[in-house]
Image (cartoon, helix red, strand yellow):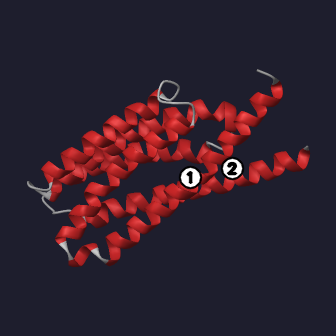
């Protein structure tokens, strides 16, 4: 493999990563809008959104891993796919019990997926740079998950709004990462 092939491969992956981050941000923004605007008036829509969020995360991580060299080269994302799929199923069951259970499951998922995202960002840093927002996102996700688990033990009944705030912060991190990669690419191209 020549230096050119290595550089063009990294540039192609950086382009993919930028688009991926923009799509993740857009989905999260749409999800948050639906959670605040529509979900309060319909328990069915709220439940559907709560199930769709980890399912989307599983699909997005799978697609990103496949487009970034495959699951063997992206083990943290492969694990994240499994964690998110298990969370999707657990949310379906927890919705039959209580929103406290749902929030506890989201908390456990946020901790695990945050740590896995942190691992993915560390691995990607050396190839793409511009991963500081994903590092912060992974760390913040793990901390938020701990807070969700604590909230789930309280007598107050949580709602989808508890998760929507978390999703909004995630959207911001994905957007910042996409913009940062865009600026980094412009700077790199200008320097050549």
Residue 81, can we see it? yes
Query: Regarding mark 1 in the picture, which secondary structure is present there?
Result: helix
At x 82%, y 25%, the residue is 3
Relative to 41, is 3 on the left or the right? Answer: right
Q: Quadrant of residue 53?
A: bottom left
**Mark 1 or mark 2, earlier in chain:** 1
At x 35%, y 63%, the residue is 164
- For this orientation, the residue located farthest to the right is 192
User: What residue would you read off at disc 1?
Assistant: 21
Image quarter of the N terminus: top right
Choose between 80 and 6: the one closer to the eye.
6
Q: Is residue 76 above or below residue 100?
A: above
Choose between 59 and 22: the one closer to the eye.
59
Relative to 181, is 19 on the left or the right? Answer: left
The tag on residue 89 is: none
User: What residue would you read off at disc 2?
Assistant: 181
- Tell me if mark 2 has few (under 14), some (14-19) or many (20+) residues whose alpha carbon lies within 10 angstroms of its own: many
Relative to 87, is 116 on the left or the right? Answer: right
Residue 153, can we see it? no
* Contact check, label 1 and label 2, Cβ < 8 Å: yes
Residue at mark 1 to residue at mark 2: CA–CA distance? 9 Å
Relative to 80, is 138 on the left or the right? Answer: right
Query: Regarding mark 2 in the picture, which secondary structure is present there?
Result: helix
At x 11%, y 57%, the residue is 98
- Tell me if mark 1 has few (under 14), some (14-19) or many (20+) residues whose alpha carbon lies within 10 angstroms of its own: many
Image quarter of the C terminus: top right
Tell me residue 150's x, y (percent): 24, 48
Q: Is residue 13 above or below residue 183?
A: above
Tell me residue 13's x, y (percent): 65, 40
């Amino acid at each position: 493999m020549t230096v050119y092939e290595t550089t063009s491969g990294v540039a192609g992956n950086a382009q993919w990563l930028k688009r991926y981050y923009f799509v993740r941000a857009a989905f999260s923004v749409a999800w948050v809008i639906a959670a605040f605007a529509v979900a309060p008036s319909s328990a069915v829509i709220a439940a559907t959104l709560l199930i769709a969020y980890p399912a989307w995360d599983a699909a997005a991580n799978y697609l990103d891993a496949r487009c970034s060299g495959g699951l063997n080269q992206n083990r943290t994302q492969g694990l994240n796919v499994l964690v998110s799929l298990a969370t999707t199923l657990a949310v379906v069951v927890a919705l039959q019990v209580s929103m406290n259970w749902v929030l506890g499951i989201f908390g456990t998922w946020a901790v695990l997926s945050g740590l896995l995202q942190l691992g993915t960002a560390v691995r990607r840093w050396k190839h793409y740079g511009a991963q500081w927002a994903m590092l912060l996102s992974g760390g913040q996700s793990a901390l938020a998950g701990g807070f969700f688990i604590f909230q789930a033990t309280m007598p107050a009944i949580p709602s989808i709004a508890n998760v929507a705030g978390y999703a909004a912060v995630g959207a911001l991190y994905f957007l910042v990462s996409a913009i940062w990669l865009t600026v980094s690419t412009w700077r790199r191209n200008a320097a050549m």
